[in-house]
Amino acid sequence: GAVVSQHPSWVICKSGTSVKIECRSLDFQATTMFWYRQFPKQSLMLMATSNEGSKATYEQGVEKDKFLINHASLTLSTLTVTSAHPEDSSFYICSARAGLRTDTQYFGPGTRLTVL
Amino acid sequence: AQSVTQPDIHITVSEGASLELRCNYSYGATPYLFWYVQSPGQGLQLLLKYFSGDTLVQGIKGFEAEFKRSQSSFNLRKPSVHWSDAAEYFCAVGLYNNNDMRFGAGTRLTVKP
């Protein structure tokens, strides 16, 4: 089956620093990648959708200048949390879809971010 | 407004017992329907999906789900639960030709020995 990886799996950083999270599709080309945020014991909330070579589309309420998304290739998307604060601490999950909208989204294992 | 409802926050079943997790959606058209499972601290694994055709869908790990248009439901079932099935289960719908995915709040399954 399709495999999506994320790196790092967990990260701890100081307040004010920036953190980059990578999402890779290992065995397929992902035209579209999605970034979700999940708070403890809650569901996934879509943050943004990125298509390869285009600017990401952010959901309402998500600060695009704070959560920078780059989808430079068909197998890699990155999420950079800039000037992180403790309230940004969360579980970030990416997913990737091969192409057609009827394709399934395959999810990465998630990245646990803790901002001190 | 479009929404996905999983009415049961937490369900406990005995190992070997049958299981049904409920999912209802509100959407003007037939959405794409998914069930995912998440173990603690892990990402989501696709159990099964429905796009069209036979309304009874078979998935991995012995799970199945049935799409009932009249009830706007897509309930997940398993005839005999194993201890390893303990996890969080999410129902999701793909809206607007699957370009926008919405997740339910999740149902946490506990399996008693």
Image (cartoon, rainbow, N blue to C red):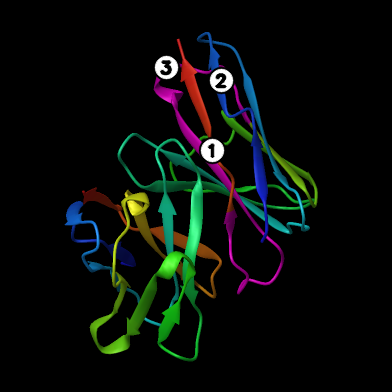
Residue at position x 78%, y 49% from top?
A75
Instruction: Give the residue displayed 68% in from the left and 58% down from the top.
Output: A2
Residue lying at 37% horizontally and 50% vertically, measured from the top left: B84
Q: Is residue A96 magenta?
A: yes
Label tally: 3
Residue B104 image-quadrant placement:
bottom left
Callout 2: residue from which chain? A
| Residue B50 in view in this figure | yes
The chain containing the residue under callout 1 comes to A
Secondary structure beneath dot 1 equals: loop
Residue B30 in sight from this viewpoint: no
Query: Residue B34 location, x and y as percent?
Result: 44, 68
Mark sitting on residue A86: 3
Is B65 placed above or below A10 here?
Answer: below
> Which residue is the site of mark 2?
A11
Q: Is residue A14 above or below residue A18?
A: above
Name the amino acid, label 1. Answer: Gly
**If you read the primary sequence from the N terminus, does the residue marked by circle 3 or circle 1 appear first?**
3
Image-based side of A98 in relation to A12, left or right: right
| Front in this rendered view, residue B43 or B111 | B111
Observer-nearest of B46 and B73: B46
Q: Can you give x and y, in whole percent of width and height, for residue A110 in the image?
A: 54, 38
| Quadrant housing residue B67 | bottom left
Look at the image and give the residue range highlighted in magenta: A80-106
Q: CA distance from mark 3 to mark 1?
A: 18 Å
Q: Which residue is mark 1?
A: A110
**Horizontal arrangement in the rendering, residue B96 relative to residue B26 (left or right):** right
